[in-house]
């Protein structure tokens, strides 16, 4: 159990700075940069716990002001919601629903 908790803390320390560096590339005018960035973020789903990734993508959505980036991140959130909901339904309710409601109100 301690090993898992240390792993999650280490992941949080790496995931946030990494996504903060990648996400602005989604607003690029160059399609190849947007595609590559999107593929990297999709690759996270394979190698990172989807619960942590869902929380990170929701955090990104809350702080995002660029209208080009929001639909891409929202699409990535929607890809993970079902699988995360099966394991952690409260997390989806607490983290994802406010982001979706805020996006729909905008």
Image: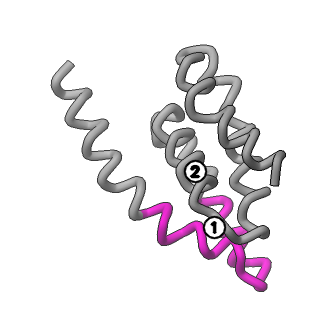
- Helix, strand or loop at label 1? It is helix
Q: CA distance from mark 1 to mark 2?
A: 10 Å
Vertical side of 91 occupied by 19: above or below: below
Q: Is residue 9 left or right of residue 52?
A: left
> Does 42 sit left or right of 28 as displayed?
left
Residue furthest out toward the left: 2
Residue 25, horizontal then vertical, whole percent: 63, 75
The residue wearing badge 1 is 37
Q: Which residue is mark 2?
A: 43
Specify the color scheme: one colour
Q: Sequence-wise, which precedes: disc 1 or disc 2?
A: 1
Residue at 74 percent of width and 78 percent of height = 32
Residue 2 figure quarter: top left
Q: Residue at x 59, y 16 (%)?
A: 89
Structural crowding at the residue carrying mark 1, measured as other residues with C-alpha within 10 Å and reported as few (<14), some (14–19) or many (≥20): some
Can you tell which mark lies on residue 48?
none
The secondary structure making up most of the magenta span is helix
């Amino acid at each position: 159990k301690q090993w898992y908790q240390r792993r999650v803390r280490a992941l949080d320390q790496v995931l946030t700075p990494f996504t903060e560096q990648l996400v602005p590339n989604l607003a690029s005018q160059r399609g190849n940069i947007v595609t590559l960035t999107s593929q990297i973020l999709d690759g996270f789903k394979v190698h990172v716990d989807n619960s942590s990734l869902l929380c990170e993508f929701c955090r990104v959505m809350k702080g995002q002001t660029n209208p080009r980036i929001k639909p891409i991140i929202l699409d990535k959130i929607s890809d993970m919601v079902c699988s995360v909901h099966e394991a952690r339904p409260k997390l989806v309710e607490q983290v994802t629903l406010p982001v979706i409601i805020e996006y729909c109100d905008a």
